[in-house]
Amino acid sequence: MNARKVYMDYNATTPLHPEVKESMRRGFELYANPSSMHEFGRTVRNQLELVRQRIAEFIGAGPEEIIYTGGGSESNNTVLKMLTCALCGGAELSPGRAEIITSAIEHPSIIQTAQHLVSMGNTIHFVKVDRNGKVDMNHFLELISERTALVSIMYANNEIGTIQDIQSLAEIAHRYGALFHTDAVQAVGKIPVDVERLGADYLSFSAHKFYGPKGIGVLYARKGKPYYPFIHGGHQEGGRRAGTMNSLGIIGMGSAVELIKAEMQEIEERLLRLKQRLRSGITERIPDITINGHPEDSLANTLNVSFHGAEGEAVLLYMDLQGIALSTGSACSSGSLEPSHVLLATGVGPELAHGSIRFSMGRETTEDEVDYVLEVLPAVIKNVRKMSTVYSGECK
Ligand SMILES: Cc1ncc(COP(=O)(O)O)c(C=O)c1O
């Protein structure tokens, strides 16, 4: 085992900020059910409502527009299902409009929910993206119509970091009378997010992507816009999301919001410099590579690189042996490799998509860590390329 440890998988999740940890430690004392009417309960409830206020301010919303959920996946499921599923009341929410438009590069919590909804008889269109992962506006304009109930486009992509022009997309959706949702899970905490400026009717985000706890997130739902609960069984969140409130998670998320609000700009400026160092270091040291994602409209922390002729999973495992945690878009399951749907959608061929690695950095990443990656990576790629020519791309 290697003594040196470098975590470069911040888009998968982030470590808790030390002060978030502290706030949660204190939060353990607030054990009463926040829905209870006694003083114990009221004390907790007051805390959670203060956090709601803080979160609302952070994204330019009103507190009544913030719904606590179990994270990004739940928020995304809620929006897509409520506007399509006739059994869930969706048909009444958008009379005469039954179609959804989403993109081909969304997170599985959107793509697979959409596929499920198609299997239930709904019509969902997947808008194409260009080579840099930007929504193809011409295709979007071809798909949108008076039948569109909802447009759901992610703000920033988790694999390649591309940032969409949400403002324009929402504006077009509204011109056609459709509602607009954005999965902002990879955006909140990395770039400024303001629901008014964006014009979003719904917006999802998740605390564990910005140094908060896992299993807690938010669905922003604009006041006056249709809403139907995904989880029934209680009056929590004004009847919009049943279940005893996750007090500890909410306290942690509140603290994470407060901290990231103060630190975001400094972190992002530093990460942009680190990304430039990593990108030019890789380009100088390793031949036959392709950088994926938009050259400018991209998250400062995310770099996605295809190494021609190298198997991504093998690179990942060799880097892991050197103590470096990275990620690949491919999923190695049941002995077969599924190339990343995101890269395929941008026009990267399956072979190149298999050889792609995501480097995602965060507030604790240092220049020294980037240099360590640059020191280790060239030899790993060389070895894996050599191996790949011997064992042609099997995953066991
Ligand atoms: C873009 C995007 N959307 C949604 C999710 C799901 O969020 P959660 O893990 O909170 O369910 C993720 C997590 O990886 C993500 O990157």
Image (cartoon, rainbow, N blue to C red):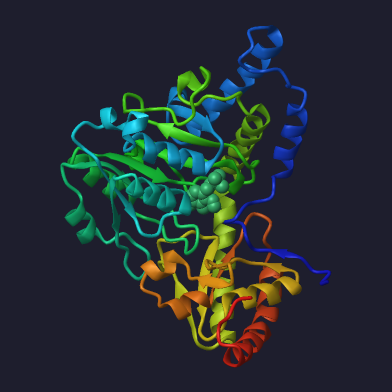
Q: Please state the total of marks drawn on the protein image.
A: 0
The answer to whether residue 359 is above or below residue 179 is: below
Q: Is residue 366 left or right of residue 245?
A: right
Which one is nearer the viewer's eye here, 260 or 70?
70
Q: Which of the 4 image quarters holds residue 387?
A: bottom right
Query: Quadrant where the C terminus lies?
Result: bottom right
Residue 190 makes an appearance in the image: no
The answer to whether residue 131 is above or below residue 118 is: below
The answer to whether residue 339 is above or below residue 376 is: above
Measured from the top left, where is residue 15 in percent x and y? 69, 50
Measured from the top left, where is residue 317 in percent x and y? 68, 73
Query: Quadrant where the N terminus lies?
Result: bottom right
Residue 301 makes an appearance in the image: yes
Q: Residue at x 45, y 24 (%)?
A: 240
Q: Residue at x 73, y 21 (%)?
A: 31
Which one is nearer the viewer's eye here, 19 or 304?
304
Q: Is residue 227 left or right of residue 269?
A: left
Measured from the top left, where is residue 35 in percent x and y? 61, 15
Measured from the top left, where is residue 378 in percent x and y? 64, 84
Q: Residue at x 27, y 61 (%)?
A: 136
Q: Residue at x 72, y 65 (%)?
A: 6
Single out the residue that lies furthest toward the top. Answer: 38
Which one is nearer the viewer's eye here, 35 or 350?
350
